Amino acid sequence: GAVVSQHPSWVICKSGTSVKIECRSLDFQATTMFWYRQFPKQSLMLMATSNEGSKATYEQGVEKDKFLINHASLTLSTLTVTSAHPEDSSFYICSARRLASTDTQYFGPGTRLTVL
Amino acid sequence: QKEVEQDPGPLSVPEGAIVSLNCTYSNSAFQYFMWYRQYSRKGPELLMYTYSSGNKEDGRFTAQVDKSSKYISLFIRDSQPSDSATYLCAMSNFGNEKLTFGTGTRLTIIP
């Protein structure tokens, strides 16, 4: 159990376009999902925490108008990178936490975004 | 000083050796400790999850937590080439959803 999927696994887009990444918990309900980005050979950087049915909480320095997060159901959260630029190219990873309060986070396989 | 310190490596060991990976931390409020394995271009995979001090064993993997020293370890016995990956330690406070990660240690098992 505790499988998290992401779609797409990779995407290439032109500068100025928007890209939507989906994160799904396949076999459990997740009240909370997290979005991270990871640069090569670096650790994960938390971007935002998403709770089902409420607005996401963004980490300091993360532009909420650029990285739109929607958590519409207990199994789906989306991250939309608006007006993407080359500096937004990165590996985006989501994670989900089960309803049990002491449980940990289970990660998706990641989405590699390349902005040309 | 970072909240969680982890030697980035790279660490190379021969197949069959015992591997020891470590993290130190400064926040005494951390109570949940995790080890994740991340293969290149993949998301982290949860390996071990422990609460407070003590040992936990799962197959070839053993996690140790020493809260008095603020030190956690992951031991891999009979290491295999398939264990070659980056290993991330992570920890959190009670009731705090956020994880604080180490920088990760790149491990290579040499056949």
Image (spheres, coloured by chain):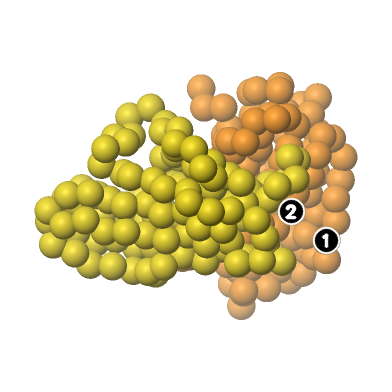
Chain colours: A yellow, B orange
User: Can residue A61 be seen at all in this image of the molecule?
Assistant: yes
**Vertically, is B53 above or below A69?**
above
Question: Going 65% across and 23% down the picture, which residue do you hit?
Answer: B27
**For the image shown, how many numbered marks are present on the structure?**
2
In-front residue for pair A25/A111: A25
Q: Where residue B74 sits in the image (x, y, percent)?
A: 73, 50
Res A93 → quadrant: bottom left
Where B67 sits versus A98, above or below?
A: above
Q: Which residue type does callout 2 highlight?
A: Met
Residue in the image at 60% along x and 67% along y: A26
Chain ID for label 1?
A: B
Q: Indicate left or right for B14 with A58 as reference.
A: right
Q: Earlier in the sequence, mark 2 or mark 1?
A: 2
Instruction: Check disc 1 and report its element: helix, strand or loop.
Output: strand
**Closer to us: B31 or A13:** A13
Mark 2, other Cα within 10 Å: few <14 / some 14–19 / many ≥20: some
- The answer to whether residue B70 is left or right of residue A80 is right
- Rounded to the nearest angstrom, the CA distance separating label 2 from label 1 is 8 Å
Q: Is mark 2 in CB contact (under 8 Å) with mark 1?
A: yes
Where's residue B77, x and y in %? 78, 64
Residue at screen point 67% across, 60% down: A28
Q: Position of residue B59 (x, y in %)?
A: 83, 66
Q: Which residue is mark 2?
A: B48
Q: Find residue B69 and name its label.
A: none
| Residue to which mark 1 is pinned | B58
